[in-house]
Amino acid sequence: MTQKVAVITDSISCLTPDMVKQCQMQILPINLYFGDKVYRDGIDITPTEAYELFQKNPKYFATSAPSPMECLEAYRRASKPKISSASPSPPN
């Protein structure tokens, strides 16, 4: 059965991996900045590590939403139909 609704959210939603898998969601990582370093939430850094950086010096910690291009790519992935099987056959 084809999934009719796509759920796309950012990593601030803090959903569990089980929930993401069960609902077949796409999670877009937010960007976390600390000084001159950029981290992708949940990919390059864990929430615990991010909090530790924040506690070290909140003045040098910032966040931003996923880029418009990352969002566009997520929508493109979500709009593609899923193929459960394909059976190529020779031309007539």
Image (cartoon, grey):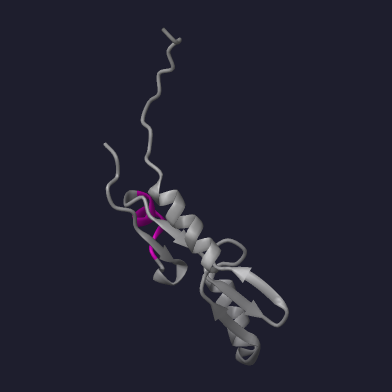
Q: Residue at x 66, y 80 (%)?
A: 34
Q: Residue at x 54, y 77 (%)?
A: 64
Q: Is residue 56 above or below residue 87?
A: below
Most foreground residue, 61 or 7:
7
Q: How would you classify the magenta stretch by its main secondary structure?
A: helix
* Image quadrant in which the N terminus is located: top left
The verdict on residue 8 being magenta is no
Most foreground residue, 79 or 32:
79
Q: Residue at x 70, y 75 (%)?
A: 37
Most foreground residue, 28 or 89:
89
Residue furthest to the top in view is 92
Q: Quadrant of residue 20?
A: bottom left
Q: Position of residue 35 (x, y in %)?
A: 70, 83
Q: Position of residue 65 (x, y in %)?
A: 51, 74
Q: Is residue 26 above or below residue 80?
A: below
Looking at the rendering, the stretch of residues picked out in magenta corresponds to: 15-21
Q: Is residue 35 left or right of residue 9?
A: right
Q: Position of residue 92 (x, y in %)?
A: 41, 7
Q: Is residue 63 left or right of residue 60?
A: left
Q: Is residue 9 left or right of residue 45?
A: left
